[in-house]
Image (cartoon, rainbow, N blue to C red):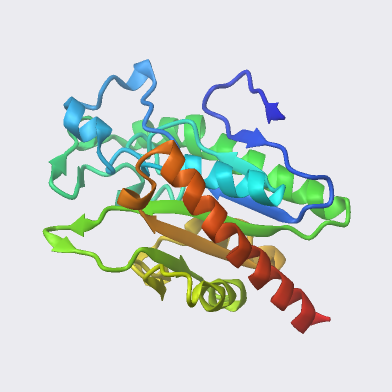
Amino acid sequence: MTTTRTDSYRAVIEEGGGAQPLVFVCEHASRAIPAKWGDLGLGEAALLSHIAWDPGALNLARGLARALGAWLVHGPVSRLVCDLNRSPDQPGAMPARSEVFDIPGNSRLAGADRAARTKAVYQPFHADLAALIAQRLALGVVPVIITVHSFTPVWHGTPRRVEFGVIHDADPRLATGIVAAAQGSGLETALNQPYSAADGVTHLLRLHATPYGLQNAMLEVRNDLIATPEAAQAMALRLAPMVSRAMTVNRAEVA
């Protein structure tokens, strides 16, 4: 079931099983830019590229959620308007440049404009996610938070060999468990690649998982491997048992 919202900038929540602790989050699911912000001065090539969203990530996250009976929370607006995985005070929250693209609509934004975008996009999304986590806790279900992203095969002209990266912040338990479960899968897998917490990519995990001591991880899949809905679904079916195994091992260790 999908929870509908009257405010299109709020989180989109797809309901999972009643006792399922897993909550997948896809912050960069959409490349949509609401009409009030125009096209930010960008051409079609930029708006279709990975600077505007994480291609394939929503299909992957949805496939994982369905395979595991998990909840899914995803953002409805391009990260170029307001990045849900960056603190609002950071330049990357509304970047004036991303990789090789200048973003005129984000150049020299006034504080009031940044605040308006934060209020319209960032605050409702995080309020919805926080409410879901609080509700699950109140029901006696301790959530496990996993964010789902994709990354480009080439970064500033340098090819990336890694195909599947698993990133952690302060708590490495789940991330290291997933990496261990991925051994022998045929995927070029690495811990804290192609990014790490030092790059500021774990903002959402720090905001929602760390304060409650919830197990968490960030999944990064190279976007050429999930370029079609069919490829994303196939990848979801490869990764789902790894996530499930890591969770099972962690529960056994705690017990």
Tell me if I can see residue 55 in this picture: yes
Pick the front one: 230 or 87: 230
**Residue 26, position in %: x, y?**
51, 45
The answer to whether residue 86 is visible is no
68 up-or-down from 218: above or below: above
* Residue at left offset 69%, top offset 28%: 3
Q: Residue at x 35, y 52 (%)?
A: 225
Residue 95 position, x and y percent, is 27, 44
Give the vertical position of 78 relative to 72 (above or below).
above
Q: Judge left or right: residue 183 versus residue 156.
A: right
Q: Is residue 199 left or right of residue 13?
A: left
Q: Is residue 107 left or right of residue 211?
A: left
Picture quadrant of residue 126: top right
230 shown above or below 33: below
Task: Provide residue 105's location: percent of width, then percent of height.
Answer: 23, 30
Number of marks present in the image shown: 0
Position in image of residue 160 (x %, y %): 24, 65
Q: Please identify the residue farthest to the right as the structure is shown.
A: 139
Q: Nearer the viewer, residue 54 or 182?
A: 182
Quarter of the rendering containing residue 240: bottom right
Residue 200 to residue 86: above or below? below
Q: Check the picture and name the quadrant holding the C terminus.
A: bottom right
Quadrant (top left/top right/bottom left/bottom right) for the N terminus: top right
Task: Name the residue at 36% across, 16% down.
Answer: 35
